[in-house]
Amino acid sequence: MAIMIRDKIAQNSQKFLRPGEPIVAVMVGQRISGWWGALTYLWIFWNRFEAVVVTPQRIVVLDCGKWTTGTPRSVLRELPRTTRIGPPSGLWWKCTTLGDKMYIHRRFHKDVALADGMLPV
């Protein structure tokens, strides 16, 4: 049975979280825009995937490597939970609020909205 990508990332990122720390939202980004894939196959050599795990206490950005999105390998950076991630727009949204630039696909825009919706206005 196939595991959904959000569930797989949540499951595999537990070792980078504090014991009992619940996950509010999970999203995946990449360092190079997906539009490069339409232009050249070489983008796969320049790209890296990053998982963003949002908890009630913090935001954790995890490195997933070049080839997979579901297996986080290390913590890249931690941000305070008060960080507003979005608002996202377009097919490949360029996010700069999580440190280095990251391109987040439209399928994860609802996760960005969920994480930001839990912040006080």
Image (cartoon, rainbow, N blue to C red):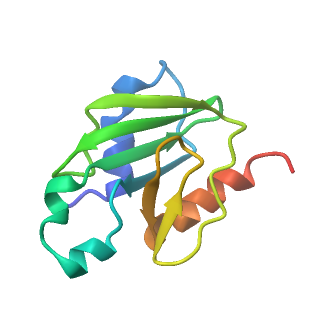
- Image spot of residue 27 (x, y percent): 45, 53
Q: Residue at x 52, y 39 (%)?
A: 23
Instruction: Give the residue furthest to the bottom.
Output: 38
- Residue 110's x, y, as percent? 57, 66
Q: Give the quarter of the image for residue 32.
A: bottom left
User: Eyeballing the image, is 25 above or below 34?
Assistant: above
Q: Is residue 37 above or below residue 57?
A: below
Tally of numbered discs: 0
Give the camera-side residue of 55 and 121: 121
Which residue extends farthest right?
121
Does the rendering let one see residue 1? no
Q: Position of residue 91 (x, y in %)?
A: 46, 77
Expressed as whole percent of the image width and height from the top left, the position of residue 42 reads 13, 65
Give left or right: position of 36 versus 100. left
Task: Give the residue at x 68% y 41%.
Answer: 83
Which quadrant does the N terminus fall into? bottom left
Picture residue at 32% right of the left edge, 76% below the top: 35
Query: Can residue 78 be seen from the camera position used here?
Result: yes
Left or right of residue 86: residue 47: left
Q: Which quadrant would residue 3 be assigned to in this image?
A: bottom left
